[in-house]
């Protein structure tokens, strides 16, 4: 029962080569796993704005993305390092 309410943990990858970033299929040798990420989507029904929260494995919010129904997007990146 507890697992039903846990957010999924996704692997965050890094692709160094620009050519490989544009491909649909990547080989394991072309990517490097650099961390894990939780993704939460919240939608405001009355305003047409979707809010995407990207968290690390410790539930620290790393990035907040706002998607408007008109097509505009805004991002806020949070850096906890000093």
Image (spheres, grey):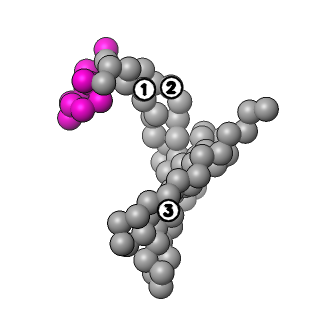
Residue neighbourhood size for the residue with mark 3, other residues' Cα within 10 Å, grouped as few (<14), some (14–19), many (≥20): some
Determine the secondary structure under disc 1.
strand
Q: Is residue 21 magenta?
A: yes
**Which residue is situated farthest in the right direction here?**
82
Q: Residue extending furthest bottom?
A: 46
The residue pinned by badge 1 equals 14
Distance of mark 3 from mark 2, alpha carbons? Answer: 24 Å
Q: Are marks 2 and 1 in contact (CB under 8 Å)?
A: yes
Q: Looking at the image, is mark 3 or mark 2 earlier in the sequence?
A: 2
Q: Secondary structure at mark 3?
A: strand
Which residue range is magenta in the image?
19-29
Q: Is residue 1 above or below residue 28?
A: below
Query: Do we see residue 54 in this rendering?
Result: yes
Give above or below for 23 relative to 10. Answer: above
| For marks 2 and 1 on the same chain, the one whose residue lies earlier in the sequence | 1
Residue occupied by mark 3: 66
Mark in the foreground, 3 or 2: 3
Which residue is identified by label 2?
A: 34
Q: Position of residue 65 (x, y in %)?
A: 51, 56
Counting residues from the start of the chain, the first of labels 1 and 3 encountered is 1
Q: Position of residue 11 (x, y in %)?
A: 45, 34
């Amino acid at each position: 029962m507890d697992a039903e309410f846990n957010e999924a943990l996704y692997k965050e990858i890094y692709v160094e080569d620009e050519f490989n970033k544009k491909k649909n299929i990547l080989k394991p040798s072309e990517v490097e796993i650099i961390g894990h990420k939780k993704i939460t989507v919240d939608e405001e029904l009355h305003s047409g704005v979707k809010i995407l929260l990207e968290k690390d494995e410790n539930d620290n919010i790393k990035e907040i993305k706002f998607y408007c129904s008109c097509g505009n997007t805004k991002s806020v990146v949070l850096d906890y390092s000093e």
